[in-house]
Every structure is written in C-alpha cells, then in structure tokens.
Amino acid sequence: MVIWINGCFGVGKTTTAEKLCQRIENAHIYDPELAGAFLWDNFPPPMKRRGDYQDIELWRKINYEYIKYIHLNYSGPIIVPMTLVNRGYHDEIIGKLREDGIDVHHFILTAPKEHIIARLTGRGEANGSWAEQQIDRCLAAFARDFPGDTVNTEQMSADEAAEHIIRACFPVIERRDNT
C-alpha cells in the first residue's frame, strides 16, 4: 500500500507522515524530493537547478519506479509526503502505480491560505518565501478536479490528520466489542 500525502508546502505533510509512520507497523517514509536533490546535485553545471525538478521526466520516472520497487519488495505501507499539483505528473506516478495494481491512497491536506502562511512563518520561513509563493498555485490546483481525498487540517493536529488517514486506509471491518 502507498499512502501519498499531498498539499501545499507548509500544510503539514511531513509532520503527518511522521505521525503515520509512528502509528502504522512497518511503515516507511519515502521523500521524492531527495530524488530531485540527487538530480540537481549530479547534473553537469549547465543543467543544475533549472526550473522545477518535477518538470524533469526522469524525476517522475525515478519516483514511479522507486515506489513500485519498494512496494514489490517490502511488506509495509509506503508513506509519500510530496506536493504534486500537475495532473499529468500525478497520472505519470500515482496513476501508473494504480494501473500496476498497487493500492494507492492519495490524500490532499488543505487549509486556508492564512493558516498555511502562519505555519510557514512558524517553521522559520521568511515572508514571501518560495513556499509561500506556491500557495495560490497549489490551492487552485486542488480546488479543480484533482483526484484525492481532501483533509482540511485547519482545526486538526497532525495526530488527528494521521488518525483520519489511518481510518480511511484501514477501515474497521468487524469489531468484537460492538462499539
């Protein structure tokens, strides 16, 4: 199983992923940003840090193949905290994983812009940071017909968001105590 946690930068993806990993046995967090950093660090100088690494087809292929490989060779859930706002890129990674028969649960964490800005500021981001500049683009993408289960985290702690995701991914089939 893959649990993809999407959302604006600063909405709580990584914190929620960490809470999930603490609560789900054998869960593993995979961060696709590390593949982007690898590409930027290992490209020849004229190719380094040009635009968004998500625009590089190789980045998308690496992540699709890597997640598929982990899924085929590891028994625990794979938790992926990563912002994806391009529907085509979603389809290239998440869509292809699903086509391969992999159970992918895609959650979009959301909150009002002011709340996200406050979270970014709280973690030390400067006003007008790159992450803050991406909020409108992200919120607009998620407001359109972007596939995923939306979780409004404005009034939720990371623990509560994790509990919501756990209930969605692991529904209780039968309870012995009738509660």
Image (tube, rainbow, N blue to C red):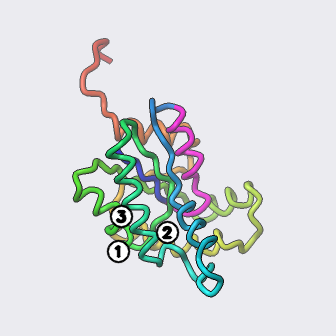
Q: Which residue is mark 2?
A: 139
SS at mark 3 in the image: helix
Please tell me whether residue 22 is drawn above or below residue 175 in the rendered image: below
SS at mark 2 in the image: helix
Image quadrant where residue 177 sits: top left
Q: Earlier in the sequence, mark 2 or mark 1?
A: 1
State the residue at coordinates (53%, 45%): 17
What is the x, y in percent for residue 156? 55, 44
Q: Which mark is residue 93?
A: 3
Q: Earlier in the sequence, mark 3 or mark 1?
A: 1
Q: Which mark is residue 62?
A: none
Image quadrant where residue 22 sits: top right
* Quadrant of the image containing the N terminus: top left
State yes or no: residue 17 in magenta. Answer: yes
Is residue 97 left or right of 156 when viewed as pictured?
left
**Distance (Cα) linking label 2 and label 1:** 17 Å
Is residue 135 left or right of 67 when viewed as pictured?
right
